[in-house]
Image (spheres, grey):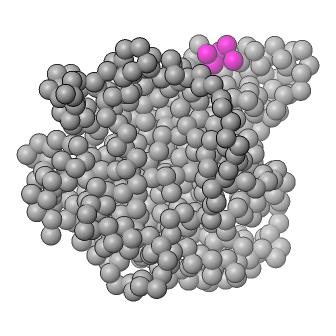
Amino acid sequence: MELHHLTLSQAAEKLRKKEVSSVELTQNSLKRIESLDPKVGAYLTVTADSALTQAKAIDAKIASGEKLPELSGLPFSLKDIFLTKGIKTTCASKILHNFIPPYTATSAQKLFDQGIVLTGKLNMDEFAMGSSTETSAFQQTKNPWDLSRTPGGSSGGSSAAVAAGLCYGALGTDTGGSIRQPAALTGIVGLKPTYGRVSRFGVIAFASSLDQVGPMTKDVRDCALVLNAIAGYDDRDSTSFKTAVPDYTQSLKKDCKGLKIGVPKEYFIPGTDPEIDAAVRKALETYKELGAEIHEVSLPHTEYAVPTYYILAPAEASSNLARYDGIRYGHRAEGAKDLLDLYVRSRSEGFGAEVKRRIMLGTYVLSAGYYDAYYLKAQKVRTLIRRDFEEAFKKVDVLVTPTSPSHAFKLGEKTDDPIQMYLSDIFTINVNLAGLPGMSLPCGMSAGKLPIGMQLIAGSFQEEKIFHAAYAYEQATQWHQMRAPL
Amino acid sequence: MITRETVEKIAKLARLQLSESDLEKYTGQLNNILADVEKLKELNTDAIEATTHAVEVANPLREDEVKTNTVIDAVLEISPDHEAHFFRVPKVL
């Protein structure tokens, strides 16, 4: 197999057996970025020099016989929302075009401590607001399976880079589906862990009660390895959870005897592409063959998730993004006549159209006289959505649904219609509102050669059940071996 | 219905300056989005508690210790304009 097709685990084994060096892996990744990224557009920053320095240091440790963590020496990249000390971090926004953070995000630091080799920072929707990576202020990322289509979003640089074999794994963030939807659209594995499982310290905030960090990898085992590395309590994020982190690779089992799988009927609707619906139903047959029990369940408030999200997320965003004022960091407008004018000009020049739209919406729903009607109402509906899941998980271990109602859509297809774009997250948003873990993994291929993803959802801090169900399915099928034709 | 005047007022609150064409566009789009949101009114939520955090969290406490902050210079270094240990802004008074 060619070097760039390897998973993190396979590359790690080759390193251990000294069949390849970290410098060779890194040079190979950098060469692929150089030749292919002009087409794919995944990278906003490539850190070639520091990557090679890191790789050499790892090789020296291997040569001296030092025992290293499994991820050591492997080329890895980060969505440009993770603060990286001394390396430009833009959140794909003009307002941070010149921002070089003075510290590093906890999740990124934990990966550096494992010895990953950072090869660069990846494109995304501006401030993670979007489902196609088209709201990036800087460039367009394309789907490696079909360069005229979106790689999904907001973590579309991450999904494209992993699917194109430009790096071996990446981190993304997920507020309403931003890890899972791009994973589905590019044929890779993406996990949004339980809210609080991974520290958000040093991750640029979008909607603080919904944002979560997670792995984007080529297969389920890689996903478990990365989650092992990044999960856990952080005293600098008071919403991270003080609970033990299991070794998730221990959950990778091949049979599903006794596993109870729930199929929420509200997720199998006429609006979904028939090929996607068929692929997920076929996966349920595979689960039966593996010994799982299949139960139909109901999540009756599913249809309220999108409107609930489009109050809560913009409200939190309008508050979080108030910090971009041109005073302390980021873009400052020239020629302001007074302080207020400086704020207004810096923000108006710095933010793009989708970010402004959400700030406006959020400011409106939080403004005097409307708070109860919108924000409080949405928080109450959020409770109903959570309860639906709590009821379902009294009966079943995991839920299986499609990840996205459509295949990767054409670039430009939905940019003029925000509501159409928002509906592409219809199956993923609920999971964020309920704070639950959800994974997308490949489960098929359309006639037009576009990947299909299915979503596994479990109760709070039940990631192990997801890993169990995901690995068993993956090992019984061939989808995880698909590689984009690049 | 949100009027164009309301959108202008919201922009002012949000510290954004919108062009004429943006004002038009956002007025239409915000109305469409809020029309979808009306759907939530179908649900009676009088007796339902609001969810602020999906996962129950308590405030984690720690000892109140004096620590030295080592990033002040680095933070000032990346600011658009500073002098000594201050961010510089246009004259306020």
Name the quadrant of the C terminus of chain B: top left
Q: Position of residue B5 (x, y in %)?
A: 9, 57
Name the quadrant of the N terminus of chain B: bottom left
* Rendered residue at 32%/78% (across/down): B39
* Rendered residue at 77%/19% (across/down): A58
| In this picture, residue A94 sits left or right of residue A404 | left
Q: Position of residue A266 (x, y in %)?
A: 49, 79
Q: Position of residue A335 (x, y in %)?
A: 16, 22
- The magenta region covers A50-54
Question: Which is nearer the eye, A229 or A27?
Answer: A229
Can residue B72 be seen in this snapshot?
A: yes
Q: Is residue A46 magenta?
A: no
Dominant SS type (magenta) = helix
Q: Position of residue A302 (x, y in %)?
A: 47, 76
> Which residue is situated farthest in the right direction here?
A65
* Rendered residue at 75%/15% (across/down): A57
- Residue A148, compared with residue B60, is above or below; it is above
Q: Is residue A51 magenta?
A: yes
- Residue A413, compared with residue A167, is above or below; it is below
| In this picture, residue B5 sits left or right of residue A298 | left
